[in-house]
Image (cartoon, rainbow, N blue to C red):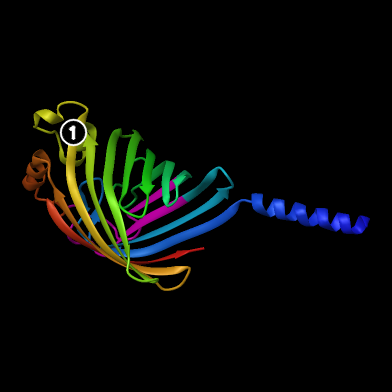
Amino acid sequence: MKLRLAALAGAVYSCVLAQNMPELSFKGSAEVRSAYLSRGKVVDARPFSAQFADGRIGLPGWGSVGGSVWSVSSFSRKGQSAARRNAYNEADYNLHYDYALEICDEWTLANRLALQWVTLPGYHADMATRREWHVAQELRNPFLTPYFLLRRAYGPVQWCYWRVGFLRRFDISERLSFVVDGFGELGDSLLFDEHYGKARGHFCSGRHAGLNALNIVIGVEYKISDNLRAYASVRQFALVSEDARAAIKASSAPQSKRDLTVATVGVAVSF
């Protein structure tokens, strides 16, 4: 009897321990894009490859913590106003905390708080590492998912950037999905000054510069297996700020584009 009770107690303890063990997960991707857009501006008009890796630890009842890295490597030295090497023009490192709040059936408010370090060895080798806080939310539901991302740079440069949009996924089959993503890109006057130069408009005289760009992305995803998928998308970018368009028009840099269509293809894994 004692042996049976001990075995039963051990089994119960193992089940409880298993339910409270942190869950480990990983995802990564490798993709090619026809141009590099960042915070409402075309910063590199050359095709490039981007690699992404993210690992996280699930905390039962408390969300998850993790870290990620994202790197950029250009395919060509041409088409840019400055001499820039190909490999690892940029590498961003990120520590993040995620928490999903279940509101009701099929409605979830996803929240993220992250600290990011941006290094630019190929674009600006002499520039110090940039530091940013990220705050993001999205209301996941079967209909239309609204979301926002706030990036707050606090050293050595300072600015605020907002990305606000709506996302809709259409599942055509168990393997095939279409995604439509429309969003606006906004920033304060400090971001405007860094990206485009001093603004002339009266609305830019204060801290808030307003809406700079609009984007629409149409993508397709194909599920190859439970752990592997392929995807492709087309993004139409358009500057809508009159001051930003005027500044870009006046520039002779090859990457100075007021409107641009960007294509992306890639593969992603998850475990």
Q: Which residue is mark 1?
A: 209
- Which range of residues does the magenta coloring cover? 68-94
Residue 269 at x, y percent in the picture:
45, 65
- What SS does tag 1 mark? strand
Residue 254 at least partly seen:
no
210 to the left or right of 154: left
Q: Residue at x 46, y 60 (%)?
A: 27
77 to the left or right of 140: left
- Identified by mark 1, the residue type is Ala
Q: Does the magenta portion include 112? A: no
Q: Residue furthest bottom?
A: 224
Residue 100 at x, y percent in the picture:
47, 45
Q: Residue at x 40, y 69 (%)?
A: 229
Q: Residue furthest top?
A: 206
Residue 73 at x, y percent in the picture:
32, 60
270 or 77, nearer to the observer: 270
Residue 2 at x, y percent in the picture:
93, 55
Residue 102 sits above or below residue 156 on the image: below
Residue 84 sits above or below residue 146 on the image: below
228 or 253, nearer to the observer: 228
Q: Residue at x 87, y 55 (%)?
A: 5
Q: Residue at x 38, y 71 (%)?
A: 175
69 or 253, nearer to the observer: 69
170 to the left or right of 4: left
